Amino acid sequence: MPLGAVRPSPLVEQAAARLREQITGGHWPVGTKLPGETTLAKELGVGRSTVREALRALTGAGLVRPRQGAGVFVIATEPVEDWPTRLRRAAVTDVYEVRMAVEVHAARLAARRRAPEDVTALWAALRARRAAGPLDDAAFVDADIAFHAAVVAAAHNPVLADLFTEFTPVLREGLIDLLSLTGLRAHDPDTGDEAHEALVRAVADGDAEGAAEVLRAELEDPFAPARDPEQPVRPGGRPGH
């Protein structure tokens, strides 16, 4: 199957896409040695430097691997997705399960490692959450996520902080949709406020297990229907936070 010449700009991206099509389409199975740069450049109608950059992009995608003195070989027919890409495709329920694992441990560490400025930041984040307008679910979710980010930051573990940052966009979209569907804040604009304050106090007091338990209870089963207002409230047991 001929490759066909590509049009100018951006040549590298077009060349990489054309080569990727050959691989993912099965024309070059796993284990196949790709034609040399000169041959590929001629078929694609580009320079060797463009082919070289395109092959580098395919290497980064996990499709090919150069072997010193032997050439470039196909090692996979599907590109390896980076973490942000996988998260964008993930179901919000899956992300929420990871969120619980990350945040509950972060709350435990925050209670052990918090500095005075961390406690100050937590109280400020709680005030900002309370100040979110009752008619603006997006602003409320942003303030809620900022509060939880402050808890994670107080754990002083950059890996946990990076993980939380990575799944925040998917989390934000899911929580906004949830609040819109349930209308929960129409009856309780500061939903979950008691649990959030209890979490700040547990962290400030250095109560690691107490902080972890408050947050675990708060995040548990977030997609259950809004509770009957006549039923008692479990600490933090409200959907969406």
Image (cartoon, rainbow, N blue to C red):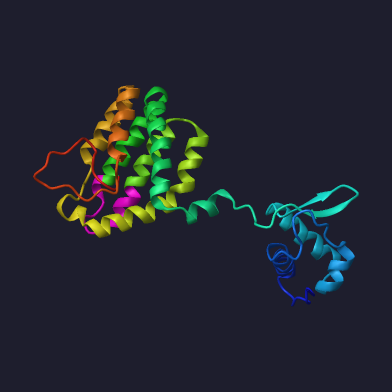
118 left or right, relative to 17: left
Residue range in magenta is 130-143
Quick check: 55 above or below 161?
below
Q: In x, y percent, where is residue 143?
A: 32, 48
How many numbered badges does the structure rendering display? 0
Q: Is residue 156 left or right of residue 49?
A: left
How far across and down, in percent of the image, does residue 50 sit? 80, 65
Task: Examine the image and state in which quarter residue 35 appears.
Answer: bottom right
Q: Residue at x 21, y 35 (%)?
A: 235
Q: Position of residue 48 (x, y in %)?
A: 85, 65
Q: Is residue 156 magenta?
A: no
Along the line of sight, the residue nearer the viewer: 36 or 156 = 36
Q: Tell me, yes or no, if residue 184 can be seen here.
A: yes
Dividing the picture into quadrants, the one containing residue 14 is bottom right
Q: Is residue 191 above or below residue 1?
A: above
Q: Residue at x 39, y 45 (%)?
A: 96
